[in-house]
Amino acid sequence: MVGDFDIFLPVVWLLVAAAIVMLIDLFGDDPDKTRMFNFFTALGGVLLAFVSLNPYWDAPPQTIMRGAMLVDQFSAFLVICILIGTAISMFASLSYVKRIGVNLADFLITLLLAASGMVLLTVSNDLIMLFLSIELLSFSVYVLTGLHGRSGRSAEAAMKYFIMGAFATGIMILGMACLYGVTGEVQLKPIGEKLAAIFAARQGTEIMATFGMGAILIAFAFKVGAVPFHSWVPDAYEGAPTTVTGFMAVAVKAAAFGALIRLAVVAFPATASAEGFFGDLGFAGYALWLLSALSMILGNWFAISQRNVKRMLAYSSIAHSGYLLMGLAAAGGNSEVYAGVLYYLLAYTLMTSGAFAMLVYASSGGRDIESIDDLRGLAWKKPAVGIGMAIFMFSLAGIPLTAGFMGKYFIFTQTIAAGGRYLTLAIIGICTSIMGAYYYLRVIAYTYFRDPDDRPVAGKEDWGLKFALGLTVLGTVFLGIFPQGFYDAAQDSVKELQHDHERPAVTAPDKPGTVAHD
Amino acid sequence: MTADLFGIFVYGILIFSVAAGGLIVSALVGKRKKGFVKEEPYECGVPQIGETRTEFNVRFFILAMLFVLFDIETVLLAPYAATFIADVHEGKGLEYLAEVAVFLAVLGFGLLYAWRKGVLDWNVPLGHNPDEVVSRVIAGEADDQASKKPVEAAHGH
Amino acid sequence: MLEPKVVLFLAAVLFSAGLYGVLSRRHLIMLLMSLELMLNAVNIALVTFSRYWAGEGAGMIGAHSGQFFTLMVMAVAAAEVGIGLAIIVAVYRRKHTADSDAASELKG
């Protein structure tokens, strides 16, 4: 037990950093003096978590806690996405939280707890662990949403998010109970084997198994905000503090999609579907198809009519959930597409957290950016805002030479290669991306081609925000120009995940001295 | 199975018939007279004051939250204790103790947070540092601020 | 000894009651209670399944994890009440009501 302790290290560093920040906040004298120390402690926690991930990159998968967690390259890839999202959110919030009147320490503690929940979600290998980690991350994000003490909107957003999220939790736990009921197992791999046998035998229990899988799928659709389970997304995104919105959009999505892919590959057998319920192909084929198509169409459609930038980005995040779900749906015909989904998650992490950080930067004059009219002519007053915003919007719209384009390219080509009804889905996706380009480019048009109003230009920005923006701009462009290395890494990760159930995972006690550092 | 449930069935019918019988008989036999006094909740008791639904101080909810969390701690300690007894002879005692210590430490952090944020002190207004409030009260200054806020909260604003 | 079917039926009824409560109630405390009812209904189902698989001679982990799952769900449900009450208190302090319809500043 002690020997495999270091597998926990990414989570442990995050939690230790949270504990230190909390102690300093509780017993420190002057919040202003300890502010920077708190910030660097939290950042150090994230960096240490990042570094301690290193041994698992090329190492064989390892299970710990009697198989409750499984650390492999797939989870390492997602943890990297999550930690990047967390770090960017921290940098962007350095002065923002102070401006909106939130204690920085409270924000950091909750953010670190949410990040540890996400890390645990990507490594969880049984239903109990999955449930616990998804709850840890959800609870932390509910609190983050409601952190903005002075704003009634923030509390309202937290309330809506909480009710919908708790409702999704209820449905998810029902689905898990059903899966446990038909298989008698909680670990993903045995569940997958038993489910395959159940669906081969077809003795009536497959109805309940399908119901359980469907319930879990619905719960995840809630968490990632796919239509028709999206009703909380615009309100929660608008009401939450802007940097929290960025964090919610990227990190929650990365963790939830990671867990969903792991479930789909390991636990839900390829042949699983009750007769006539989900169609005849793959994991919940038609359900995912429908979720994806609806999210892409309605997300983009509602985003067009939004004049509030945060709400627009919220609907755009629904649309992006649709693109990612398209990858999951097409995996029924072509499992190569998972790598595209992973790559897209990384690209999405960079560009979306960058876009939200840019909103903070653009609004740092005193009040938040609300309407798109606030961006009028901003590019001439603040050239950095213009260029950065243009890069993020190009990337979100999927214009070449950006990360977003490459992500869409990988997903769309693999989906088209799957053929059949996935081809229809890909065509819907391409049409809606073109539709989406309208409202992304409108933002750029407002920043460049509208006359600036006479509102005073914002004051001095802090270095944290600038650092976050530099990082995301560089990352977005770099990923767009040199995608191959990252895509290969994503492919390796997915291969490892898919071969997990053929190759027995190395358990930690078999390898004393833990992992080979190669 | 059927025999087991038959008893419960008869019992249920009895309960239902006694309850319904009382209502039906009183409806058939009794006379009805309506009036202000009749409609009162306590026909021959003390006169009623105020609303039926009173507002509670918000602090009750916050204390309830804390209570619930520490209540559940016991639930998780019970299975721990059961496995501890079974495995302690195999020399795993220290390891188990360390694990439960971590668990309790995490909960302890929660209590620490609540304490330092002044949740446990009824007279400290929410969102204020208890140390500051106490030192201000001792110094005799701004006594009104420390006492006014909780009263305000007690009346639900 | 009741059959699992009967207990599962009870769990289904309780879950549906919770579901109905979430969909129809407007007071936030009632919503929270309905959410708890949903989780606790699932708890009953989990314990039933656990007992069933123990009777079927499933392995140690398979048979007992249902009960352990129940304990975890209870703990999470308690945390959920904590967070939920905190959010309701926060909403109440701004709006002076705990009616979910009153929270309509955000259009959605």
Image (tube, coloured by chain):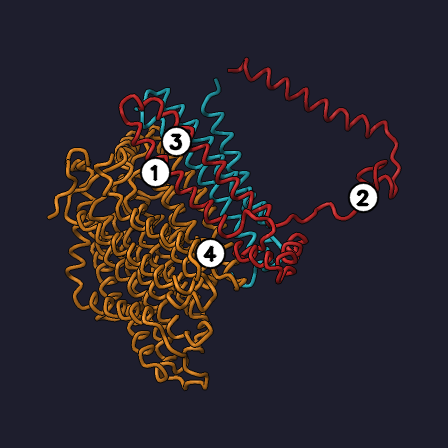
Chain colours: A orange, B red, C cyan
Residue wearing tag 4: A232
Helix or strand or loop: what does disc 4 sit on? Answer: helix
Residue A21, relative to residue B12: is it above or below?
below
Helix or strand or loop: what does disc 2 sit on? Answer: loop
Q: Could you say which is closer to the camera, residue A451 or residue C77?
A: C77
The chain containing the residue under callout 4 comes to: A
- Disc 4 marks a residue whose amino acid type is Trp
Q: Is residue C48 visible?
A: yes
Q: Say whether mark 2 and mark 1 are on the same chain.
A: no
Please state if A11 lies on the left or on the right of B70 as rendered: left
Q: Nearer the viewer, mark 3 or mark 2?
A: 2
Helix or strand or loop: what does disc 1 sit on? Answer: helix
The chain containing the residue under callout 3 comes to: C
The chain containing the residue under callout 2 comes to: B
Q: Say whether mark 2 and mark 3 are on the same chain.
A: no
Q: Is residue A226 visible?
A: no
Residue wearing tag 3: C68
Q: Nearer the viewer, mark 1 or mark 2?
A: 2
Q: Work out which residue is located at the far front of the displayed protein and give it.
A: B139
Please state if A102 lies on the left or on the right of C30 as rendered: left
Q: CA distance from mark 3 to mark 2?
A: 50 Å
Q: Nearer the viewer, mark 3 or mark 4?
A: 3
Q: Quadrant of residue A176?
A: top left
Please state if B33 lies on the left or on the right of A441 as rendered: right
Q: Residue at x 36, y 44 (%)?
A: A133
Q: Say whether mark 4 and mark 1 are on the same chain.
A: yes
How crowded is the residue under tag 1: few (<14 C-alpha within 10 Å), some, or many (20+)? many
Residue wearing tag 2: B48
Residue A127 has which mark? 1
Q: CA distance from mark 1 to mark 2?
A: 54 Å
